[in-house]
Amino acid sequence: MNKVACFLFIMTMQLTFAQLSVRNNAYVYVNNMALYVEDDVNIEENTAYIYLRNGSQLLQGSGTTGNSGQGRLSVFQTGTSNTYMYNYWCSPVGINSGSAGNTVFTPNVNFFYETAAPISSSPFGFITGYNGTTTQIANYWLYTFTGTTAPPNDYQDWEGLGAGPGSLATGGLANGTLASGYGFTMKGNPSGAQKYDFRGRPNNGTITTTLNANRETLVGNPYPSAIDARDFIHDTNNAAIIDSGTLSFWEQDPTQSTSHVLINYVGGYATYTIDVTGTVETFTPATFDTYNVDGTLNTTGGGSTSGKNVYRYIPIGQGFMVKGNGTGGTLRTTNAMRVFQKEAPTLSEFFRVGDNGRTENQYNEEGMFMMPDGYKRFRLNIDFDDTYTRQLTQNFHHTATAGEDYGLETISPARLSSDVYWPNNDKAYNAQAFSFDVALHIPLVLNINRSQLVRFRLFDIQNFDESQPIYLHDMDNDLYVDLRTQNYELNLDAGNYANRFEITFTSNALSTEDISIDDFTVYQNNNLSELHVLNPNQREVKSINLFDVNGKQLFTKVDLPIAPKYEYSTKHLSEGVYIVKITFESGQDLSKKIIVANKQ
């Protein structure tokens, strides 16, 4: 093999080495490209460096010795958090000492800030206060989550990496070190988008972390290159232990993050998965909610909804949560998952990457993934009191089953104060898959913590025939609402609604579309805020009555003249479902449900 001692500027091409050795006072400067080393990297003396700049990345092959040396690789990543917001990280480097192989990450050894472009940086200072600066990191907010303590997945399970006051760790990790592959949290500084310089021995080869059964672990991309989420999720080892193939990405609401006080936190988890072919991505955005002092969800209020996205290629430094299934085991990342995939410069989200000449899936102008032929999809937005929105995704493909479809479905993250999900196999999903059939009945479960207005909206409808309705069936009211033509909203009292709502594709009762008996038609004109009753054959009408869904009579019209049309104002009515009952002189009755949604 070739072993090269370097003092190089690599600017315009992709360079490949069998092995790479950087000696005393030498450095390799890589600009806007990939550096590929088939075997191992030895940055020998502590004055030797490899600088990855302007999106450059280091990829490695099948070397078995492990990277070595006392020198450092340097790579930048920019956080989006401010003083009060967490980012989830995973270091691409470890400390630059010890025998060959991956080493532990230590914040006060591996974190630097840039002092003079393009290669000069200084170590961050670490303080015991709450607020970081452009040159100091607050110890207080450095935590990891390994899911090994009891009770599982509790707020108190976070383990401190820093030495600041008030640590919640029940036995913090020794000396603030973290094995490669595990993720950690950190807050930023008042300037917001802080550029961090990770410096140390580059991680390489197979990296393992423990994923406990039915518990979450904070892991991430441990390399100085992007990794392919498809290869990570569908690795044969990982597919046997990751619950539903779901990756969860933390985000906080920047408009509400103005305090370190826990009850003022407004945040949530976005979820992502991808099918084994890499052609179908399923992403559901974070729904923000607030938290109590003990870290539990605040059940008296809510937050807004995220506008960020997650795509296939996971960038350098990105941390995320993974939950073990019922067995758990050893999670792994490997060099085979590594790709040269730069973050697109026009995308602001830390965990959002774009095109760099690789074969990419297609997205529309709203950033929604475009389903390939043979797949269908729709998304359902459920608004709770106009406070926040939970988004659900429904995928369809002929290979999908009524059970779990790994890579097409995602587990719903932490339940909100009021929430909704797809139920399946005693689990709560925010994305699921079926083989499409017009006879399908897809149940929804709603948990409502207090009386409030709930609204159902449909969007991102892909590869459905234009004539195919998508109904929300309100079984208590025997009402079918085609969400392709109108939203449905109603007031719900506190409680669990496990058997009231479902999605169907056929109507088995009187449709919410206009109905006729002998050409007699009843409909609500919401543009005019009027109830219209059409009587083209001029039948004799005895009375027209309007009731709410609780049976309360709101008005009655009698002694009606024979006329082709009757019109009544509904401006005074609250938005909701009502029942119109028409009685004919012949004794025949006609009842019709209408939805009042008065236009402002």
Image (spheres, rainbow, N blue to C red):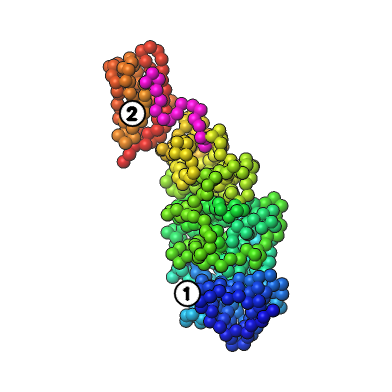
Quarter of the image with the C terminus in it: top left
Residue shown at the point (52%, 56%) measured from the top left: 361
Q: Position of residue 159 (x, y in %)?
A: 63, 64
Q: Which residue is mark 1?
A: 134
Q: Which residue is mark 2?
A: 531
Count of labels in the image:
2
Q: Nearer the viewer, residue 241 or 436?
A: 436
- Would you place residue 183 above or below residue 534 in this image? below
Q: Position of residue 84 (x, y in %)?
A: 48, 64
Q: In this view of the protein, can residue 152 be seen by the observer? A: no
Segment colored magenta: 503-519
Residue shown at the point (50%, 32%) measured from the top left: 506
- Would you place residue 82 above or below residue 583 in this image? below
* Label 2 packing within 10 angstroms: few (<14), some (14-19), many (20+): many
Q: Position of residue 125 (x, y in %)?
A: 54, 77
Q: Amino acid at mark 1?
A: Thr
Give the number of the mark in front: 1 or 2.
2
- Magenta segment's dominant SS is loop
Direction from residue 325 to residue 428 in the image, left or right: left
Q: In this view of the protein, can residue 239 be seen by the observer? A: yes
Residue shown at the point (60%, 53%) measured from the top left: 277
Based on the picture, tell me whether residue 512 belongs to the magenta stretch: yes
Based on the picture, tell me whether residue 571 belongs to the magenta stretch: no
- Disc on the earlier residue, 1 or 2: 1
